Amino acid sequence: MLGFFVDLLHLYVRVFDLGEVLPVQMLMRLPTRPSGRMPDLFVIGRDDALRVHHQWFEGPALFVAEFLSEGDPERDTVDKFHEYGDARVPEYLWVDARPGRKDFRFHRLDGARYRLVEPDADGRYHSEALPGFWLDPEWFWQDPLPDIERLMLRIAPREYRRHLERLLAEAEVE
């Protein structure tokens, strides 16, 4: 599930040149928690490259996602929730796919606190931190997980087609 979401975000961020999806084992150092946190995934803006160091990212990311851990889900839903909010991470998503669970919470910073984002009429959640990006939580419960190429054709059909056409044109020149 995490790999699926990392791959989808990597593709979306690359197509729109929004920044970078940082690796799972990258520390995000926060002013409110100098030792930092290692989110399951996070996205930084393209202007944030100077804040990337060898093993950590300095400051809050644009978008953070956590898949709740079996051992300590409260760390993600309470501790990190408050720390990311205090550090001004604009959007925080957590997915609870532990055995017997099926929960999805998308939070957006509103002033000094997170507010729960509601889905649109089609059950989709729209990101403001990643313009144009939306996701359907049902994707996470599908078996097998959906194909990210097909999802991109749903999320951003024109832009993704243009991206593929550019790649094909570049391949023909080589």
Image (spheres, rainbow, N blue to C red):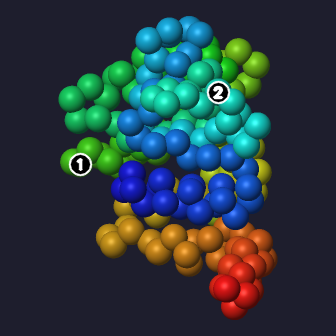
Q: Quadrant of residue 108?
A: top right
Please tell me how crowded label 2 is: few (under 14), some (14-19), or many (20+) other residues with Cα within 10 Å.
few
Question: Residue 72: x percent and y percent?
Answer: 26, 25
Q: Can you identify the residue that label 1 sits on?
A: 100
* Badge 1 amino acid: Gly
Q: Nearer the viewer, residue 7 or 107?
A: 7
* Badge 2 amino acid: Arg
Q: Residue at x 62, y 46 (%)?
A: 20
Q: Quadrant of residue 90?
A: top right
Number of numbered discs visible in the structure rendering? 2
Q: From the viewer's perspective, is 106 left or right of 128?
A: left
Q: Residue at x 55, y 28 (%)?
A: 53
Question: Residue 82: x percent and y percent?
Answer: 52, 16
Any part of residue 163 in sight: yes
Query: From the viewer's perspective, is residue 10 above or below residue 22?
Result: below
Question: Residue 122: x percent and y percent?
Answer: 64, 63
Q: Residue at the far front: name it.
A: 174
Query: From the viewer's perspective, is residue 100 above or below residue 147?
Result: above
Q: Quadrant of residue 88?
A: top right
Mark 2 residue element: helix
Q: Can you identify the residue that label 2 sits on?
A: 51
Q: From the viewer's perspective, is 9 left or right of 103?
A: right
